[in-house]
Image (cartoon, helix red, strand yellow):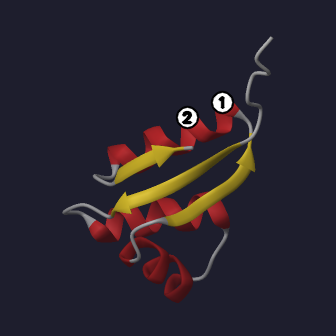
Amino acid sequence: PVEEKTEFDVVIKDAGPKKIETIKVIRQLTNLGLVEAKTMAETAGSKVLTGVGKDAANDAKGKLEAAGAVVEVL
């Protein structure tokens, strides 16, 4: 039997056209400072969250996508 994955990473692919909104969401999700969140938003492939549950990952993805970001859950 295949084991179901229980830990997920939320990876930002592109901050999108509303980068400031994306940065705000990153700060809410991670408690990072402005400079760190801005760097994360501008760096494709940055892991916003690592090792989180499926619900938390999907919730974060929804919030980031609502801000205009392109996000992948791995």
Q: Residues within 10 Å of mark 1 (few under 14, many from 20)?
A: few
Q: Nearer the viewer, residue 61 or 74?
A: 74
Q: Give how far across and how far down residue 52 sits, in percent.
A: 73, 45
Q: Which residue is mark 1?
A: 55
- The local secondary structure at tag 1 comes to helix
**In this picture, residue 47 sits left or right of residue 67:** right
Residue found farthest to the bottom: 35
Residue found farthest to the left: 17
Which residue is rendered at x = 25% and y = 61% of the image?
A: 16
Q: Which residue is mark 2?
A: 58
- Please state which amino acid type lies under the numbered disc 1: Asp
- The local secondary structure at tag 2 comes to helix
Tell whether label 1 touches label 2 (CB within 8 Å): yes
Query: Which image quarter: residue 8?
Result: top right
Which residue is rendered at x = 34% and y = 44% of the image?
A: 66
Q: Tell me how far mark 2 sits from mark 1, CA to CA.
A: 5 Å
Residue found farthest to the front: 1
Q: Give how far across and how far down residue 1 sits, in percent.
A: 80, 11
Which residue is rendered at x = 51% and y = 88% of the image?
A: 35
Which residue is rendered at x = 56% and y = 51% of the image?
A: 10
